[in-house]
Image (cartoon, rainbow, N blue to C red):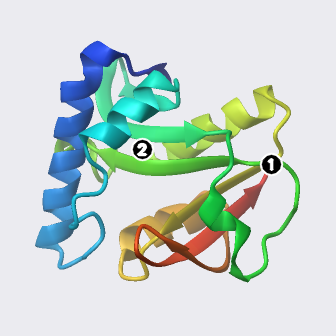
Amino acid sequence: MNTLRHATSRDLPDALAIIDQAKSFLRAQGIDQWQDGYPDEAILRADIEAQRGYFLMADGEIAGYLCIDFGGEPAYDHIDGAWLSDAPYGVVHRLALLPAFRGRALSDAAFDLAAALCRARGVRSLRADTDGCNLRMQRALARSGFVRCGTIFFQGGDKLAFEKPL
């Protein structure tokens, strides 16, 4: 069974380790995403303090880390393209899986669980973004029902922007 668990301040080293492994994985694939220091300890600490940092749990084990934010993403205010809706939305940022859990479609589970959190809050839209060269994440987003809406500028570069109506 897959669930989400809020990350706590004690969990910061585990969250950092997951992100660091994901950075190495992206680098090994020749993907520039997350190779400039982002996301760093301060960002993960802010996620945790704001209670938007989560661990994806697979059968009781930590499988990954993600941020689910309901505060809006300023970078999404300016899109080259068009969002599917103007309604309040949730955002998935910083989704990363531990190596032992890759290839099990757990990103699908993470997006489903994030969507369930949105619905529980009355939010009917979920958004995400990724680099153009991150084909693995683009496929995961498409599998989970996200629609490519255009391009935004985030963390110093252009990102493909996606939305999933709920």
Disc 2/disc 1 C-alpha distance (Å): 19 Å
The outermost residue toward the bottom is: 80
Observer able to see residue 104? no
141 left or right, relative to 90: left
Residue for point 60% across, 57% down: 144
Q: Which residue is mark 1?
A: 166
Tell me residue 17's x, y (percent): 16, 37
Residue for point 72% across, 58% down: 164
61 left or right, relative to 30: right
- Within 10 Å of the Cα at label 2, are there few (<14), some (14-19), or many (20+) other Cα atoms? many
Report which quarter residue 133 is drawn in. bottom left
Q: Nearer the viewer, residue 147 or 144?
A: 147
Q: Which residue is mark 2?
A: 106
Q: Nearer the viewer, residue 89 or 76?
A: 76
Say the numbered circle drawn on residue 2: none
Q: Is residue 126 above or below residue 56?
A: below
Tell me residue 98's x, y (percent): 23, 42
Element type at mark 1 = loop
Element type at mark 2 = helix
Observer able to see residue 51? yes
Tell me residue 18's x, y (percent): 22, 40
Residue for point 30% across, 45% down: 97
What's the amino acid at mark 1? Leu
- Within 10 Å of the Cα at label 1, are there few (<14), some (14-19), or many (20+) other Cα atoms? some
Tell me residue 57's x, y (percent): 39, 25
What's the amino acid at mark 2? Leu
Q: Which badge, 2 or 1, is on the more N-terminal residue?
A: 2
Q: Is residue 147 above or below residue 13?
A: below
Q: Is residue 164 above or below residue 97?
A: below
Report which quarter residue 80 is drawn in. bottom right
Q: Nearer the viewer, residue 135 or 51?
A: 51
Report which quarter residue 117 is drawn in. top right
